[in-house]
Amino acid sequence: MTTLRMPPRIARLAAALPLIAVPLLFTAGPAHAVPEPSANPCAAVTVPEGHICLPEPKYCITTPCPQYAVVPDGIGPRVFPMR
């Protein structure tokens, strides 16, 4: 039976390959879901008249966790004090 000998150059390459490949696994990016920057959290929100929906991203540990705020639009009729 013949034994196969690995040339020293290939043996060094085989030993160095995991040292090169492992750091690449950690730089590939996050494994968790990251919302797309173009995703609009206000797309499915119904706002009352005189209000607007503003995206308001936040980090939450509980649900529900709305990523928007409904605020007065400030464009409606103004009431000025009489002088």
Image (tube, grey):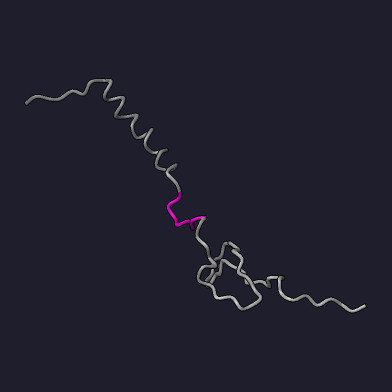
Q: Whole-percent x and y of residue 5? A: 18, 23
Residue 40 picture location, percent across and down: 52, 63
For the stretch drawn in magenta, the main secondary structure is loop
Considering every residue shown, the one lying at the far right of the view is 83
**Residue under the point 45% across and 46% down:** 29
Give the residue at x 23% y 20%: 7
66 lies left or right of 24: right
x and y percentages locating residue 53 in the rendered image: 60, 69
Compare residues 15 and 79 and report the one nearer the observer.
Answer: 79
Q: Is residue 31 above or below residue 65?
A: above
In reply to whether residue 32 is colored magenta, the answer given is yes
Q: Is residue 55 above or below residue 22?
A: below
Q: For residue 14, what is the image quadrant?
A: top left
Residue at the left extreme, as displayed: 1
What count of labels does the image hold? 0
Of residues 61 and 80, the one nearer the viewer is 80
Q: Is residue 2 left or right of residue 36?
A: left
Camera-nearest residue between 6 and 63: 63
Q: Residue at 74% across / 76% down in the picture? A: 77
Residue 63 left/right relative to 53:
left
- Displayed quadrant of residue 16: top left
Which contiguous range is marked in magenta?
30-37
In this view, 20 is above or below 83: above
